[in-house]
Image (cartoon, grey):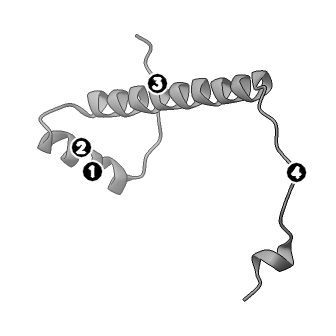
Amino acid sequence: MTNVTIALDETTLRDARRIAAERSTSLDALIRDFLERLTQSESQARRARRRIEELCRDSTGEVGERGWSRDKLHER
């Protein structure tokens, strides 16, 4: 693993250490878990966007004639 240095203000660092202690883990593990979940979530979202683009590109669906007007939609 590679080490990373980050700069935090004292309040954030103190609160993060407290949270880590409450969860019976280390600050390193807390940050590592957060970043792993973040990157996994982003990867899944990226794959989903690519799949949607692929489905749109390959779609054979067609949009029919518009049988309505704005005035008809808002008619009371």
Query: Which x, y percent locates residue 36?
Result: 40, 25
Are the residues at dot 2 and dot 4 in contact (C-beta closer than 8 Å)?
no
Tag 4: residue type?
Glu
Give the residue type that dot 2 points to.
Arg
**Precedes in sequence: disc 2 or disc 4:** 2
Sequence-wise first label, 3 or 4: 3
Query: Where residue 19 appears, x then y in whole percent?
Result: 21, 46
Considering depth in this image, is 63 or 45 the residue closer to the camera? 63
Query: Which residue was labeled with disc 3?
Result: 4
Measured in 3D between alpha carbons, the distance from the residue under mark 3 to the one under mark 1, in whole angstroms, is 19 Å
Q: Most extreme residue toward the top, as rendered? A: 1
Does residue 74 appear left or right of residue 41 in this picture?
right
Q: Residue at x 47, y 35 (%)?
A: 6
SS under mark 2: helix
Nearest the eye: 28 or 57 = 57
Question: Residue beneath label 4, please?
Answer: 65
Looking at the image, which is closer to me, 42 or 10? 42
Occupied quadrant, residue 45: top right
What is the C-alpha distance between the residues marked 2 and 3? 17 Å
Q: Is residue 69 above or below residue 76?
A: above
Q: Is there CB contact under 8 Å for labels 2 and 1?
A: yes
Quadrant (top left, top right, bottom left, bottom right) of the C terminus: bottom right
**Mark 3 touches mark 4? (CB < 8 Å):** no
Residue 17, disc:
2
